[in-house]
C-alpha cells in the first residue's frame, strides 16, 4: 500500500485521538459483533480446555464442515486433505501464491484490486501484471484484454468476486468466458478469492470458479469467515484445490505459523453450522448492508459528474470522483488525485475514506458502508458539502 494512503489513515486516527469527531468510512471490516452462537462456541472451547495445538492444516471437524459447505453451497467437492485452514484468508492467499509461483512468473490481477494481491505476488518473487477495468463496465475484467495479456510466463489469475473494493460480482457467463481462455493456457491457474461470497445482493448470485467445467483442476478456492460472519479478529480462512498445491500450502504453513487458533476453529465450526449461507443470522446482516448500499447509491448518484457502478456484493462503494480533480483550493493546493481528495475530505468534512490509488484506480475513492445508516447519512452530508465547495458557484 502506498505510504500516502497509510498517512491518511494515520492522520484520521490522530484526529480522533485529539477528540475531533471524524467519521471513518475507511474500515475493511463489519461493524456488527460476532454472532452470539459463534462467540459462545469460542467461550466453550476455552472453558472445556480446548486450548492446545491443532493439526497444522486445521481440525478434521472444521475441515469436514468446510468440505460440506463447499459441496452444498458451491458445488465443488474436495477431500479434507485438499483443504488447509489458516489464520485468515490473507494467509491462505499468500501460501497459495507461494505454492504456485516461481520467480519471474506473472500473476494477473484485474484492477481495482485488493491492496495485498500485488504485494503478495512480489513476496513470491513473481511479477504482478495489472489489467485495468472500467467503471462503465462495472469494473469487470474484459476477457479480450485478458487473452491479449497472457504470455508464457502467466501463471496465476486472481479473481475476487464479490470484489473488494468495487462490490462487483462476476456473472456466471463471464466466468465461463474466462474459463475458456484459461483452458487454452495449460500453465495458467486461477486463485478465486470468495471471501465476500455471502455478502451479495439478489438477484446477483455467486459462482465458484472451480465449479465450472474443467476448472476444478485449475483453481485454488480461497474463502474465510472474517467478513460474512463478522469474525475478523478470530482469524480463520481456508484454501482448497488439487492436492499437489494444497500440500505445498500445508508445508509452508507448517514452518510459518502452524495451525490456526484452536478456539477460533471451534467457533468456525459453529459459524458453518448456522445454516445455508450462514442462515438467518447472516441474512439479517446482508439486509442491513443492502439498505446502506441503496442509500449511498441513491445519494451519490444525485451528485453531478460522479460515476458509479452499483455494488452487487461486499460492503464497499467505489466511486469515480475524477470530475473534481484539477480544482485549486485555497491554503490546500490542487486536488490532483484520489489521495489529495481524501486528504481534502478529511480536513474539510472530517470523513476518512481510502484513496482509489491504493487499489490501482486513482480516479476513485472507496467508501465502506460497514457503518450504521445514521453514520452514513451524516458522513454523506459532510462529503457532499465539501465536494460542492469544489464546484464553481454557477454549476451547483
Ligand atoms: C478481498 C479480500 N480477500 C481476503 C481478505 C483477507 O481477510 P482475512 O485474512 O481476514 O480472512 C480481505 C480482507 O480485507 C479481502 O478484502
Image (cartoon, rainbow, N blue to C red):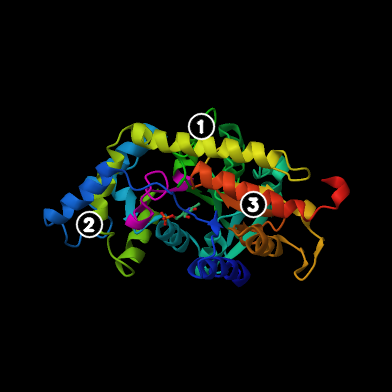
From the image, tell me which residue sits under label 1. Answer: 205
Q: CA distance from mark 3 to mark 2?
A: 44 Å
Q: Secondary structure at mark 3?
A: helix
| Residue at x 49% of width, y 35% of height | 206
**Residue 37's mark?**
none
Q: Is residue 233 magenta?
A: yes
Q: Secondary structure at mark 1?
A: loop
Magenta stretch bounds = 217-237
Q: State whether label 1 is within 8 Å of ligand 1.
A: no
Query: Mark 3 vs mark 1: which is more N-terminal?
Result: 1
Q: Nearer the viewer, residue 235 or 6?
A: 6
Q: Is residue 246 magenta?
A: no
Q: CA distance from mark 2 to mark 1?
A: 33 Å
Q: Indicate left or right for 280 with 322 as reference.
A: left
Q: Nearer the viewer, mark 3 or mark 2?
A: 3
Q: Give the quadrant of the C terminus.
A: top right
**Residue 382's mark?**
3
From the image, tell me which residue sits under label 2. Answer: 262
Q: Nearer the viewer, residue 187 or 271?
A: 271
Residue 333 percent across, percent down from the top left: 78, 69
Amino acid at each position: 500500500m502506498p505510504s500516502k494512503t497509510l498517512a491518511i489513515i494515520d492522520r484520521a486516527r490522530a484526529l480522533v485521538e485529539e477528540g475531533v469527531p471524524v467519521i471513518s468510512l475507511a474500515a475493511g471490516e463489519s461493524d456488527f459483533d460476532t454472532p452470539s452462537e459463534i462467540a459462545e462456541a469460542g467461550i466453550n472451547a476455552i472453558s472445556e480446555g480446548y486450548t492446545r495445538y491443532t493439526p497444522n492444516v486445521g481440525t478434521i471437524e472444521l475441515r469436514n464442515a468446510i468440505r460440506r459447505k463447499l459441496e452444498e453451497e458451491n458445488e465443488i467437492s474436495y477431500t479434507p486433505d485438499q483443504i488447509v485452514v489458516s489464520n485468515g484468508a490473507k494467509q491462505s492467499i499468500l501460501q497459495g501464491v507461494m505454492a504456485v509461483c516461481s520467480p519471474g512468473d506473472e500473476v494477473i490481477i484485474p484492477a481495482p484490486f485488493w491492496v495485498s494481491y500485488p504485494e503478495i505476488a512480489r513476496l513470491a518473487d513473481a511479477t504482478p501484471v495489472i489489467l485495468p477495468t472500467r467503471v462503465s463496465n462495472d469494473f469487470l475484467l474484459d476477457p479480450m484484454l485478458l487473452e491479449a495479456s497472457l504470455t508464457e510466463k502467466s501463471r496465476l489469475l486472481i479473481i475476487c468476486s464479490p470484489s473488494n473494493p468495487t462490490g462487483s460480482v462476476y456473472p456466471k457467463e463471464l466466468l465461463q468466458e474466462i474459463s475458456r481462455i484459461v483452458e487454452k493456457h495449460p500453465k495458467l491457474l486461477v486463485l478465486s478469492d470468495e471471501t465476500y461470497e455471502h455478502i451479495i445482493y439478489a438477484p446477483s448470485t455467486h459462482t465458484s470458479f472451480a465449479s465450472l467445467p474443467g476448472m476444478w483442476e485449475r483453481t485454488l478456492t480461497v474463502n474465510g469467515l472474517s467478513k460474512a460472519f463478522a469474525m475478523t479478529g478470530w482469524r480463520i480462512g481456508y484454501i482448497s484445490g488439487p492436492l499437489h498445491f494444497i500440500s505445498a500450502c500445508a508445508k509452508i504453513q507448517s514452518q510459518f505459523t502452524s495451525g490456526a487458533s484452536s478456539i477460533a476453529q471451534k467457533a468456525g465450526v459453529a459459524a458453518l453450522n448456522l445454516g445455508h449461507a450462514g442462515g438467518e443470522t447472516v441474512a439479517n446482516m446482508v439486509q442491513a448492508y443492502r439498505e446502506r448500499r441503496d442509500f449511498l447509491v441513491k445519494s451519490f448518484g444525485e451528485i453531478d459528474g460522479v460515476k458509479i457502478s452499483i455494488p452487487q456484493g461486499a460492503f464497499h462503494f467505489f466511486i469515480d470522483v475524477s470530475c473534481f480533480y484539477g480544482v485549486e483550493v485555497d491554503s490546500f493546493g490542487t486536488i490532483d488525485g484520489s489521495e489529495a481528495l481524501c486528504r481534502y475530505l478529511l480536513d474539510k468534512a472530517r470523513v476518512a475514506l481510502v484513496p482509489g490509488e491504493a487499489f490501482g484506480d486513482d480516479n476513485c475513492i472507496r467508501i465502506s458502508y460497514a457503518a450504521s445508516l445514521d453514520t452514513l447519512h451524516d458522513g454523506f452530508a459532510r462529503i457532499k458539502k465539501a465536494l460542492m465547495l469544489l464546484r464553481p458557484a454557477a454549476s451547483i
